[in-house]
Amino acid sequence: MRDVLTTTAELDALATIGAFVRVGLEHAGFDERGNWQVQLAVDEAATNIIQHAYPAASPGAIEVIWWFDDTTFGVELRDTGKPFDPAAVPRPRIDAPLEERDGGGLGLYLIDQLMDTVTFAREAPGVNIVRMVRRRPAQAPAVRQFALHGRLDARHSAAALAAVRTALDDGARAVLLDLSDVSFISSSGLRDLIVLLRRVRAVGGELRLCALQPLVAEVFALTGFVQLFPIHPTAADGLRAFGGPTRAS
Amino acid sequence: MDTTYLEITHRSFSRTDLLELRGRLDAMHAPELRQRIEALFEQGRTRIVLDLAGLEYVSSPGLRVLIEARKRARDRRLPDLEAGDLRLARLPVRIREVFDLTGFTNLFQIHDDVVDAIGSF
């Protein structure tokens, strides 16, 4: 995913830029703290451009681009103002006493602390680029676990699976069905499970089953359904398997 | 965190002044805080507590205002020969994180309670 915002390099654009980047960070799965940290780094870089790249009387444009792939989230800020040499900015002495501190260099220091990599470049013709990248948080899917009860037959299975369909509609993508209390499954029940499986896969999700009673397990074996569903001996095994291979065991 | 304002509320006590900050202390709004503190200095009021409980965001221009203000408060001698100071109360967790990152935690007297901060003068 990727998005671009172009705005005038003025101080009242800072809140707008922060809100713009926040949307990308939310899509990329950052929690509130990580989101806030990256926003602060972007805010510092934008402040630097607004205050130093252009004359205050005639601010130019600032372009903000965010993107992310499977592992990293990046933000780029582009301006066409004065070149910027980060090496010329003294780094603050973080452990110095008050008398020896003047608050200079804190913006760059914070960017370095909050992002994994930061590069400053000047590209022809006259474009300054600061590119900041941070690892995305590990994407552990939130698993929704459902315990089914009694008989999964023509009369009961659709109702039993209704809650799962609702969860899918609400955005659940990792679903574990606990069948430990299911004593019987009919061909209707099997059909409803297949429909559910297709539905989960259609939205890019994962459906796993666990804790089948011996008779139910036998039906799965006889019908070849063991080839279609990943089945785990216990709920704990099932929960651990999410995010891994989805082929049936 | 789509806040776009900084709100500063002033309460005056006999020996100290309390400024309650709400919102964003970024490059846009840091000058507003500098001016409010400057105005207190001009009235000879140099014992100031900042209540930061409502502060959602701080970036380096805001941090610079805090450093400069504390230095200036301590430089100014009151008629009773007690130095002034700028003390802080009730830092939200995110603000505390920025303070820790930048070494600011050791630069300020920080109180968990506003009454304690005012009473510390």
Image (tube, rainbow, N blue to C red):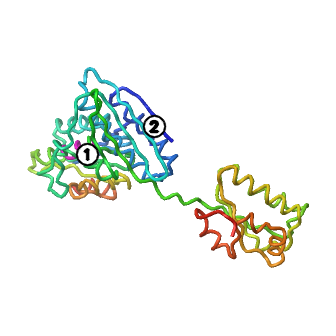
Residue B90's label in the rendered image is none
- Residue located 64% across and 62% down the image: A246
Which residue sits at x=26%, y=40%? B61
Callout 2: chain = A
In which image quadrant can residue A241 be found? bottom right
Please report whichever mark, 2 or 1, sits nearer to the chain's N-terminal start: 2
For disc 1, the chain is A
Quick check: do tags 2 and 1 share a chain? yes
| Quarter of the picture holding the C terminus of chain A | bottom right
As for residue A87 lying within the magenta part, the answer is: no
What's the residue type where badge 2 is placed? Phe
Residue A74 lies, in percent from the top left, at 40, 45
Residue B81 lies left or right of residue B57; in this view the side is left
Q: Nearer the viewer, residue B105 or A30?
A: A30
- What's the magenta bit mostly, secondary-structure-wise? helix
**A220 w.r.t. A100: above or below:** below
Residue A108: mark in rendering: 1
On the image, the x and y values in percent for residue B4 come to 41, 35
* Neighbour tally class for label 1: few under 14, some 14-19, many 20 plus, Cα within 10 Å: many
Q: Among all residues in the image, which is located at the extreme top? A: A58
Residue B14 appearing in the image: no
The residue that disc 2 covers is A20
Asked if one can make out residue A2 in the rendered structure from this viewpoint, the answer is: yes
> Left or right: A221 with respect to B70?
right
Classify mark 2: helix, strand or loop: helix
Q: In the displayed image of the protein, which residue is found farthest to the bottom?
A: A214
Q: Nearer the viewer, residue A74 or A146?
A: A74
Mark 2 residue crowding within 10 angstroms, few (<14) / some (14–19) / many (20+): some
Boundaries of the magenta span: B62-68
